[in-house]
Amino acid sequence: MNSIHCPWLPWAGLFIVFLLSVVPASASASCLDCHPENSFRLDFPASVHGPNGCTSCHRFPAGGESHPLAADHRPTVDCNRCHKDIAQAYASSVHRAAGVGCSECHAPVHGLHAWRENKEKAVELCLGCHDQEDYRQSVHGRAVADGNDDAAACHDCHGLHDVRAVSSLSPGQVQAFNVDTCIPCHADKEKMTRNGVRLGVVASYLSSHHGKSYRLGSTRRAAGCADCHTAHRVLPKSDPASSLHGDNLVKICRRCHPGATASFTRYYPHGDHHDRNNYPLLYWTFLAMNCLLIGVFAFFWIHSILWMFRGFVENRKKLAAAARGEGVLVHAAHKQYRRFSKHHILFHLIVITSFLGLSLTGLPLKFSDQPWAQTLMSFYGGVEYAGLLHRACAVLTFYYFVAALLLSINFLFISKKPSGNCWQRLFGPDSLMPNGKDVRDLLGMVRWFLFRGPKPEFERWTYWEKFDFLAVFWGMVAIGSSGLLLWFPEFFGQFLPGWVFNVAIIIHSDEALLATGFIFTVHFFNTHGRPEKFPMDFVIFNGQISRQEFIEERSAQWRRYREAGVIEQFEIKKPSGVVYDFILKGFGFLALFTGLALAFLMLIAFIRG
């Protein structure tokens, strides 16, 4: 089939292309009849908007093209048509509220060229309206003026189009702003190394109480970067005009701590306990606490694992012997005896309540980078309310510590029982002070673990129970004293150097980790998890122990009481009531599961690093 030949068809195609290419230019050309200025004729075609025609921006109302000079037909400019995302950000900005339009920053509007992230140009534009001589003289301003693109310009902190007034932010948002604007640059190791800026300041800040409050979304204003370094006048510490210069530190600290003194300012805001050269005291304190942690956990975890296996084997043997009709038969095996008095039970309930309260409110601060920590803090209503609960539980802790001291004084010097002088009572079988028998019992338990000998015969207190009791005193020295320092820094800062608070933070944090880790693993196993007692030893809640348990677990005490003829004095005539047992058992299991859940969350935090 022959194709139809049309000699004008190619010319028609070229004409259509020509029309498409000249329509915008023709529209612009018609505008030049009334606007012949060089800013339109020469500058506009070379600008970023040059490929567009005038009517791409200047939109006339319907019929307006035929009456361009009519007052009610003036063209409108809407940058939102092409720059939707930018316009949306600008709509909520402080510039929009102040009536600052696009053309006031993006000028000359008809000769506009791409800024290509020129920081010097951006700063000059901002300083045209904002008189910030402090910024010009700062390390950031000088670096930008020298052409350093790594330095912070105005838009790096405040943004380009979504600029918000700091005065409109809540205290918590101000803190977040003061930190969020600094972290991206100062956490960039390559950028900081390239500019000779100290590394690790972000990590050290985030590990401080202020940084942890920031991470956990504090609703109150805790110190952010700009609160100490200022927002715009960031200068070297050696500069007399710097906020961090020795002559200015007290004034800066008193913004948040009215009672701050020169001694108080010796605190290390960015003290790094991994830096042995610059912070040797922090380094050695941290090392000592870690050695204590590793030593205690290594010993008692191995102890618990060995006991778990040996106890399981022992229980199997007893079951097999019972099935054969063998084994030791105890007369009146279920007869109850008093092991703890009512005030012992009350004190232990206070200990449980205060310890769990301290753990639930303190561990989220310790592991502030974990999602579960942020969830818990939100549940409490924020860091501030968690702090109130933490201090309330601390008061309970001081209460039972004083009570333990009074009971000890009464036991040693006032009570008529047991008999003997102070020294005999201190190291006697009814005392919680370790003695030679505890060493022999420990070695005997190790032999029993390894199937090398019988299980030791225990007295009223075992060596692991004595360790638990004495840990309260050590814990009050370590956790209690450091906690008081951190609770009242302005008071102690009157006569103690500020670096004491850095040491207190390490001790308080690591000792709390030791206490919670020990209680929720070792103590829970020794008391409730060992095969002889699983799933719970209820004696601390009702103070009663059966004759079977008494003879099997504390045979040396049973024999001593029998020989002294006092065993009948400890018989329980009326066991505890059902309602009482039900309520306290429910409380006990709730406390147990809460502790185990916290131990699991701590494990997750360590796995995630």
Image (cartoon, rainbow, N blue to C red):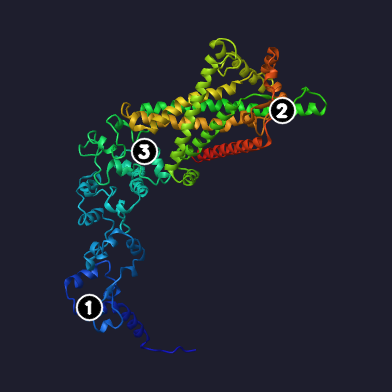
Mark 1 highlights which residue?
Answer: 31
Q: Residue furthest front?
A: 573
Q: Name the residue type under label 3.
A: Gly
For marks 1 and 2, give the CA distance. Answer: 99 Å
Q: Is residue 96 above or below residue 313?
A: below
Query: How many neighbours does mark 1 have within 10 angstroms: few (below 14), some (14-19), or many (20 or more)?
Result: some
Q: Is residue 252 above or below residue 15?
A: above
Q: Residue 45: which quarter of the image?
A: bottom left
Q: Can residue 372 be seen from the camera position used here?
A: yes
Q: Residue 266: which quarter of the image?
A: top left
Mark 3 highlights which residue?
Answer: 200
In front of the other: 174 or 109: 174
Question: Which mark is in front, 1 or 2?
Answer: 2
Q: Can residue 453 be seen from the camera position used here?
A: no
Dot 3 and dot 1 residues touching (CB under 8 Å): no
Tag 2 or tag 1, which sits nearer the N-term? 1
Q: Residue at x 70, y 14 (%)?
A: 565
